[in-house]
Image (cartoon, helix red, strand yellow):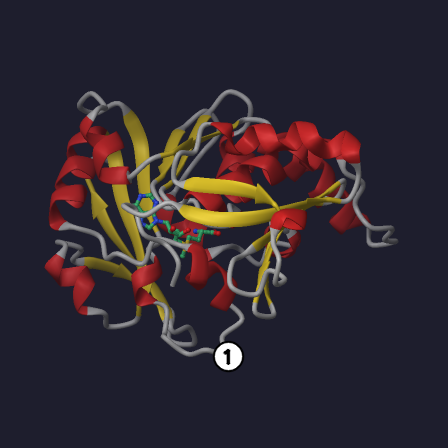
Amino acid sequence: MLFNKDRPLTIAYKLTDKSLASKLKWFEHLPEINLIPAEHLFNGTDDIPLLRITNKGLFLEQNGQRLFFHPNMAILRFVNIIRGDGDRFLRAVQLKKGDSFLDATMGLGVDTLIASWTVGAEGKVLALESSPLIFTLVTEGLENMKNRVFPLTTHSLKKQAWNELSQAATYIKTIHTDHLEYLKSLPDSSLDVIYFDPMFRLPRTKSSAMQPIKTWSDPNPIKKETIDQALRVAKRRVVLKERKNSPEFSELGFQTILENKYSPIDFGIITISE
Ligand SMILES: C[S@@+](CC[C@H](N)C(=O)[O-])C[C@H]1O[C@@H](n2cnc3c(N)ncnc32)[C@H](O)[C@@H]1O
């Protein structure tokens, strides 16, 4: 795990084309990251992460792991929703057009994209991320989704998903912050729904497909104080995604659980008003 709020992280970067140097601007305001050109390293880059800056996006690599923004999961979920198969996240958050939504744990931005598509241009989506690397990769990915071409597909629903989700990406405001600090700065009852999907519940196996995000993300559990702040700021509900039967649900005050007997994950809900 590389995330440490108190220690700057050195990263080497490689540009696939000189014209991409402007992308370094993403790192200018991140004191947590010390970016150096890869050609300044003597012994390769295995000891420190390598950031490839390409016209297809930003790719972070180390020891065979690769982290980058990829909306494939959001596209699959979009297709399922349009086909009428539903979406557990949407059932839990109960968003509708025009709502305001705070994603307190943005991660790779999948839930945020689905939320933004649901609330539409008239809604508001704020997505918070404390890991500087994940924040940068995903913010750049969301901002550039509109400029990138979806790989050729004859699947018309996937094309529709790409078009509508790249539009939805433009409505998302991403913020690099710790969610507790940010929540404290917000007025009472100022957002409809607040959502938490922490890293904490993810198993500690090395083989997991989630390994790259685990390596660079903030692993800390959600504090009770954070949920208390969310309950002050939310108008309608606060939602927590967690492992089935996780003690976190009751410890953080989530009594209503949206269960699915076939899934290892459930959603806890605290309703403030219907
Ligand atoms: C499991 S991921 C979220 C996945 C996301 N729901 C998605 O659909 O891609 C959790 C993310 O929350 C971030 N995080 C953890 N603690 C945080 C905090 N205190 N403030 C902001 N972000 C935090 C982690 O760095 C990680 O990227």
Question: Looking at the picture, which amino acid does disc 1 mark?
Answer: Ser
Where is residue 271, by image quadrant? top left
Residue 111 seen anywhere in this rendered image of the structure: no
Residue nearer the viewer, 104 or 239: 104
Residue nearer the viewer, 133 or 268: 133
Where is residue 25, by image quadrant? top right
Picture layout, residue 82 above or below residue 123: below
Q: Which residue is mark 1?
A: 207
Residue 181, image x, y percentages: 22, 33
Describe the element under mark 1 as helix, strand or loop.
Answer: loop
Residue 44 vs residue 18: left or right?
Answer: left
Residue 227 vs residue 62: left or right?
Answer: left
Residue 129, image x, y percentages: 39, 41
Please tell me how many numbered marks the rendered image carries: 1
Residue found at the far front of this picture:
42
Residue 18 seen anywhere in this rendered image of the structure: yes
Residue 187, image x, y percentages: 20, 20
- Residue occupying image coordinates x 80% and y 38%: 17
Residue 205, image x, y percentages: 41, 79
Picture layout, residue 143 above or below residue 111: above
- Residue occupying image coordinates x 54% and y 71%: 209
Residue nearer the viewer, 251 or 106: 106
